[in-house]
Image: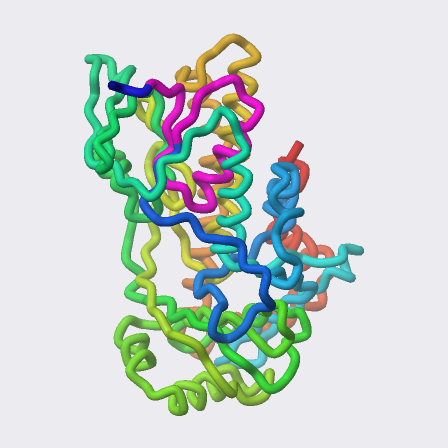
Amino acid sequence: MNQQFDLIIIGGGLVGASLACALKDAPISIALVEAQVAPAINTHAVSLDDADLRVSALNRASESFLTGLGVWQTLPANRLSAYDKMRVWDGEGTGHIQFSANELAETHLGHIVENSMTNAGLMALLLQQTNVQLFNPVKVESIETLTDDSAEYLLQLDSGQLLKTPMIVAADGARSWVRQWAQFETREWDYQHHALVCTIEVDKSHENCAWQRFTEDGVLAFLPLSQTNLCSIVWSCPEERANELLGLSDTEFLAQLSRTFEYKLGQVSACGKRVAIPLRQRHAKQYVKNGIVLVGDAAHSIHPLAGQGVNLGFMDAYVLADEIKQGLARGLAASHPQVLARFERRRMPENLSMMVAMESFKRLFAVKAPALRWLRNWGMSKLNRVDFIKNHIVQMAMGSKRHIR
């Protein structure tokens, strides 16, 4: 027997789960299909051994979104790390920029949060919703178009269940199977870089500061965790270099990491498991097609140098839920073309703008010509003394809270 839903979300990660939560009061039936076992909330203090390798720098807009859902309040305080400063410098020169929440009369710029903690909070909330049915851990085996005008889809799950719907939201990540099945066109290129991630212990306090050093071949970020001597690192570098770093002993790796970071936090004294993730820039030419909608990394994936990927995904979820609810109030179905077109018009320009900005930063710091390097360092130091421009940049990174109603 087929189960009928108004909307099926494929992917129960941060973006897919937040979308389902944002529709908790909508008079529609929702299925959320997620292949992985849902994580559990961990209330123990973060440690080198149990910290999630995947963390996100959630900006103030994402925090407001999650607070509005009722999720932020449930996350364990001892796993959240507010940061009130950002320090960025050019490892090949003297240029540097410092951002501070105090300069904006704010308490903090954002939070570093383990992805598993946020996801666990979202999933716990979903279990309380009456309009959402969770299929987990279950995979979609196939999708079939039931009508000539693509107005109805049949999904077969590996559990043998059959689900029908006029609307599918693909929240299944950067390598989205749904996006490929529906033949969405994308613009993409390989950065020829990997992001090496791990949790580390340092000698000095991280000062609730997000640190970022641009090196000759990439970017090295130290992100503060809730314990003042623990950081999560993201080291973007060429694939060959990433593999070399993975092959080092802990002692050799810690020595190279300390040196590359210029001992800003003293010696890096210990590290957890190391993993390298390939980096690829990708943007779908359209987010909507025949009742199928792309959100989050399924629609756009960017370089992690400013940590904006998840924040863009959360805003996708917020805007799509907002447009669906507005459409329902006007008597339009969630899958109505007008509803989905409005979502695409609101999100595509902002996502493209952020992607262009991040790509420009990456290319600027990849320049090796001495004259251009000098100009880059001069510009950074000059910008550091121009408060109104610097504050505008950090407000963009914090997210525009006016988008969250």
Q: Nearer the viewer, residue 128 or 261?
A: 128
Identify the coloring.
Answer: rainbow
- Is residue 261 something one can see in this rendering? yes
Numbered disc total = 0
Q: Which quarter of the figure is the C terminus placed in?
A: top right
Which residue is located at x 24 percent, y 34 percent? 157
Q: Is residue 179 left or right of residue 116?
A: left
**Residue 148 percent coordinates (x, y):** 19, 13
**Residue 53 percent coordinates (x, y):** 44, 65
Image quadrant in which you'd find residue 235: bottom left
Which residue is most to the top? 331
Q: In the picture shown, does residue 383 fall above or below 137?
A: below
Q: In the picture shown, does residue 240 fall above or below 134?
A: below
Does the stretch in magenta take in 5?
A: yes
Image quadrant in which you'd find residue 231: bottom right
Which residue is located at x 49 percent, y 35 percent? 19
The segment highlighted magenta reads 4-31
Which residue is located at x 48 percent, y 80 percent? 92
Q: Nearer the viewer, residue 149 or 250?
A: 250
Q: In the picture shown, does residue 325 fall above or below 216?
A: above
Which residue is located at x 58 percent, y 65 percent? 44
- Is residue 357 something one can see in this rendering? no
Does the stretch in magenta take in 92?
A: no
Q: Which quarter of the figure is the N terminus placed in?
A: top left
Q: Nearer the viewer, residue 245 or 397?
A: 245
Q: Is residue 227 left or right of residue 106?
A: left
Q: In the picture shown, does residue 9 fall above or below 222?
A: above
**Residue 78 percent coordinates (x, y):** 64, 63
**Residue 268 percent coordinates (x, y):** 52, 85
